[in-house]
């Protein structure tokens, strides 16, 4: 490790490692473009033929939202604010439980490709169209940020060409999405999760060697106040506390895992409900592994830089540059390893962008093209799906250019999911859990939730919370060598968490706008549900007849009765009250799938293959 501020630079070996990652990703796309006869139908392209198994889908789910924002942002977050971020491990667990037991059974039973198809089956076409448009806007904005932000951070520290990296990742990503469809996306995600773990591991192992073991790292972190796991302050204005991460984090991530097309499309592509649920639970292990790596990297970074903070000393110009700075600093004597870390960051980008492009293509074809052009053949739809993938790839690269003009990127990215994802989660929750919710209540609830979360979200961007709300930890620069020329370039930050206090702040700025960004999603969801329920009751919701397959029913929990006999009673032997269907113990056995077309017993259904439970697929 060199003098503080004097770090290594990229070598030919580093560029080769990075290029190899891109080439392997592209090769997977080429393989799945032709494997098994290629992508003949839109179902093959968008859903992998509904033949995926649990483990690869689980790793794909992990990769999809563990983007470069996680690789670069989370270690910097832990370095600056402490290890409280690890409480997200609990949020992830609750999120997976809610997603697999409440949302997944309904989506899987209906055999849908786009989650927004559900909104038409449950409400009407207008609700479906409105939800689709909101999703498309949300994902294009987010994807642009995800492509641009890491390229900028890595460019500033390593000299890695900025627009070359943006265009290369965008083009490779679009290429394998367009060529190989969902199967290519899932299997490249599996490969990229491996690269992400390898990149993190190289930094952690080298840091442990530099510090002489894990014990000095934990000691330094403890005495530096970084092991601050338990802060039970209930104040919703505090940026991170146990409660904001547990409650706000659960709502934010349930909006992603429960109803976001990028994730739902993956687990309903599994060949059975059992595999779909298994993919979510195995994915939880992946989330915990990546989170552990990120937190350990942040603590190791603090141990190494506790006497010379590169950010305070102006060796880097933004917090998101800290992780690549550390990687170049401690891995400088090992050609190829800094390249592995950069490949790790870009693997996060590729996996997120490919998921977004595939999901955007699915939603566009299923919600905006098929309903209005019913005469299109499956072959034409397959080509249209590939064309939309290509188009969205180009749009996302263009959005990266727009993102270059924006600041505050990490919180902006998470805030986008909170502001849009929260109300959408409320909309789907209304449909699945409240039988009396109608289309009027759904639209008014969604608009109300969206308005409120947009209000607080935009207000918090204009008037950032004061440092007293963010609780930054102290840093030292006593051990720095200031003879090295410092970075002077100022750039937009992934984590603009501290801001100078504006001269005049309205009263709302220090209470309503200072609310933790994790609560944006919570507010949007709760407002959408409460308003939706009230409006539905006032507009005759109790009188409507609805398709019971669109609701969560006691049948969805029948497997619990086979696992735990204590849940059984005599009524269960006769009738399912919610779905009004006869259930004899000999006649109804739930093996985990309600949809015979995708039964994991691999039954060969040749007739009526385009329908399931009377619903056209």
Image (cartoon, helix red, strand yellow):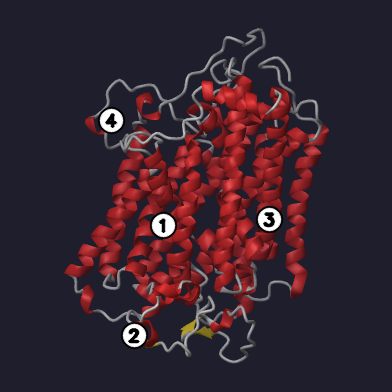
Q: Is residue 225 left or right of residue 391?
A: left
Q: Marks 3/2: CA distance? A: 42 Å
Q: Mark 4: which secondary structure?
A: helix
Q: Which is more foreground, mark 3 or mark 2?
A: 2
Q: Marks 1/2: CA distance? A: 35 Å
> Which quadrant would residue 464 be assigned to in this image?
top left
* Residue plotted at (35% across, 49% down): 522
Residue 134's label in the rendered image is 1
- Extreme residue in the left direction: 538
Is 281 above or below relative to 305? below
Q: Position of residue 8 (x, y in %)?
A: 74, 23
Name which of mark 1 and mark 4 comes first in the sequence: 1
Q: Mark 2: which secondary structure?
A: loop
Q: Is residue 174 left or right of residue 451?
A: right
* Residue plotted at (63% across, 23% down): 216
> Which quadrant would residue 14 be assigned to in this image?
top right
In front of the other: 91 or 169: 91
Residue 510's label in the rendered image is 4
Residue 190's label in the rendered image is 3
């Amino acid at each position: 490790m060199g003098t503080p501020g004097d770090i290594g630079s990229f070598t030919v070996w580093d560029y080769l490692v990075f290029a190899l990652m891109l080439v392997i990703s592209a090769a997977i796309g080429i393989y799945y473009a032709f494997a098994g006869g290629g992508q003949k139908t839109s179902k093959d392209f968008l859903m992998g033929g509904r033949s995926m198994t649990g483990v690869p889908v689980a790793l794909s789910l992990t990769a999809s939202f563990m983007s470069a924002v996680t690789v670069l942002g989370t270690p910097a977050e832990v370095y600056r604010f402490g290890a409280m971020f690890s409480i997200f491990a609990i949020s992830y667990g609750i999120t997976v439980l809610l997603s697999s037991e409440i949302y997944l059974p309904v989506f899987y039973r209906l055999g849908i490709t786009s989650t927004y198809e559900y909104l038409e089956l449950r409400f009407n076409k207008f609700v479906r169209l409105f939800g689709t448009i909101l999703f498309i806007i949300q994902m294009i904005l987010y994807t642009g940020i995800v492509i641009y932000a890491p390229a900028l951070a890595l460019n500033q520290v390593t000299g890695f060409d900025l627009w070359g990296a943006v265009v290369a990742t965008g083009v490779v990503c679009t290429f394998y999405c367009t060529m190989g469809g969902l199967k290519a996306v899932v299997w490249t995600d599996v490969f990229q999760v491996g690269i992400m773990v390898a990149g993190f591991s190289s930094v952690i192992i080298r840091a442990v060697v530099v510090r002489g073991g894990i014990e000095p790292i934990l000691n330094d972190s403890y005495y530096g106040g970084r092991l601050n796991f338990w802060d039970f302050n209930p104040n919703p204005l505090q940026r991170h506390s146990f409660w904001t991460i547990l409650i706000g984090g659960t709502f934010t991530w349930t909006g992603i895992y429960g109803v976001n097309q990028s994730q739902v499309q993956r687990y309903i592509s599994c060949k059975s409900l059992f595999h779909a649920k298994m993919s979510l639970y195995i994915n939880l292990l992946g989330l915990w592994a990546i989170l552990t790596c990120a937190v350990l990297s942040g603590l190791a970074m603090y141990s190494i830089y506790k006497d010379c903070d590169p950010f305070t000393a102006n060796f880097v110009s933004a917090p998101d540059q800290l992780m690549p700075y550390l990687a170049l600093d401690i891995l400088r004597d090992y050609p190829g390893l800094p390249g592995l870390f950069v490949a790790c960051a870009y693997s996060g980008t590729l996996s997120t962008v490919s998921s977004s492009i595939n999901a955007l293509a699915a939603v566009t074809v299923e919600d905006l093209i098929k309903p209005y052009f019913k005469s299109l053949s499956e072959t034409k739809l397959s080509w249209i799906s590939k064309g939309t993938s290509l188009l969205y790839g180009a749009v996302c690269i263009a959005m990266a250019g727009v993102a270059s003009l924006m600041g505050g990127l990490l919180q902006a990215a998470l805030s986008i999911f909170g502001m849009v994802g929260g109300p959408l989660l409320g909309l789907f929750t209304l449909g699945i859990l409240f039988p009396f919710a109608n289309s009027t209540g759904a639209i008014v609830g969604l608009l109300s939730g969206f308005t409120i979360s947009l209000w607080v979200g935009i207000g918090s961007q204009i008037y950032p919370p004061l440092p007293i709300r963010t609780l930054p930890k102290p840093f030292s620069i006593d051990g720095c060598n200031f003879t090295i020329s410092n970075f002077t370039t100022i750039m937009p930050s992934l984590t603009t968490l501290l801001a100078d206090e504006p001269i005049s702040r309205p009263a709302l700025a220090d209470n309503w706008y200072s609310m933790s960004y994790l609560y944006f999603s919570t507010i949007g969801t709760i407002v959408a549900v409460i308003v939706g329920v009230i409006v539905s009751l006032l507009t005759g919701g109790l009188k409507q007849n609805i398709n019971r397959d669109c609701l969560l029913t006691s049948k969805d929990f029948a497997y619990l009765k086979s696992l735990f006999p204590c849940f059984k009673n005599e009524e269960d032997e006769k009738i399912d009250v919610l779905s009004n269907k006869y259930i004899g113990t000999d006649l109804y056995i739930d093996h985990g799938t309600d949809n015979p077309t995708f039964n994991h017993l691999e039954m060969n259904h040749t007739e009526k293959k385009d329908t399931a439970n009377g619903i056209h697929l």
